[in-house]
Amino acid sequence: KNEVEQSPQNLTAQEGEFITINCSYSVGISALHWLQQHPGGGIVSLFMLSSGKKKHGRLIATINIQEKHSSLHITASHPRDSAVYICAAVFKAAGNKLTFGGGTRVLVKP
Amino acid sequence: DADVTQTPRNRITKTGKRIMLECSQTKGHDRMYWYRQDPGLGLRLIYYSFDVKDINKGEISDGYSVSRQAQAKFSLSLESAIPNQTALYFCATSDTTDTQYFGPGTRLTVL
């Protein structure tokens, strides 16, 4: 069964702290996406990766294919990083469709 | 202007009514998707279309139908709305790299 699990479900941090969100998936994938959902509801694609590591500003995404695990890191967190972060997998047997994790709600306090 | 637009943005309706949610995109993508989001359940795929002549069911298609009127337009219909279809609905498009671009969402309430 194609499953995607995220942890933690909720995370509260102080401004400036380093944040890590974890994503595990059940079987082989062709790609892993990280998305950000703003408090107003809009969803933005942050990263798509199939191996290694990607960095954009203060955001870093890594993936370990052997361990079926990906992490999203936020360095020097800021209140504007408060959002729901969602990972989604493209399972090899499922064509180009995404299967989504339940999301991690991040609150960064000033 | 937004690349992916959805109308309406909010809708309150009654059980049994027919509802259509519309999605338009200016990105020129062939692939379009409809998702629903429920608290605690994450996003789930309702229908998807990889080109104008291609329509496929997702994991929760029962109670929904779609129409791909053109490359740029993909509509979702609820033939007879029921309260458990109350949710946030998102349209999305993707290019061949699978990066997805989401619309702003439609908040639907079925009373």
Image (cartoon, coloured by chain):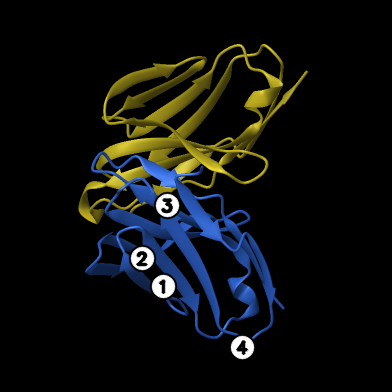
> Chain B's shade in the image?
blue
Res. B61 mark: 1
Label 2 belongs to which residue?
B58
Q: Are marks 2 and 3 on the same chain?
A: yes
Q: Are marks 1 and 2 in contact (CB under 8 Å)?
A: yes
Q: Residue furthest front?
A: B1
Q: Residues within 10 Å of mark 3 (few under 14, many from 20)?
A: many
Q: Which residue type carries mark 4?
A: Gly
**Residue B38 placement (x, y as % from top left):** 59, 59
Between the residue at mark 3 and the residue at mark 4, the CA separation in whole angstroms equals: 27 Å
Residue closest to the eye, B97 or A18: B97
Q: Is residue B5 above or below residue A59?
A: below
Q: Is residue A86 rendered to the left or right of residue B87?
A: left
Label 3 belongs to which residue?
B92
Q: Earlier in the sequence, mark 2 or mark 4?
A: 4
Q: Residues within 10 Å of mark 4 (few under 14, many from 20)?
A: some
Which numbered mark, 1 or 3, is in the foreground of this view?
3
Q: Are marks 4 and 1 on the same chain?
A: yes
Q: Chain of mark 3?
A: B
Q: Are marks 1 and 3 on the same chain?
A: yes
Q: Are marks 3 and 4 on the same chain?
A: yes
Q: Is residue A83 rendered to the left or right of residue A61?
A: right
- Which chain identifier belongs to the yellow chain? A
Res. B16 mark: 4
Q: Which residue type carries mark 3?
A: Ala
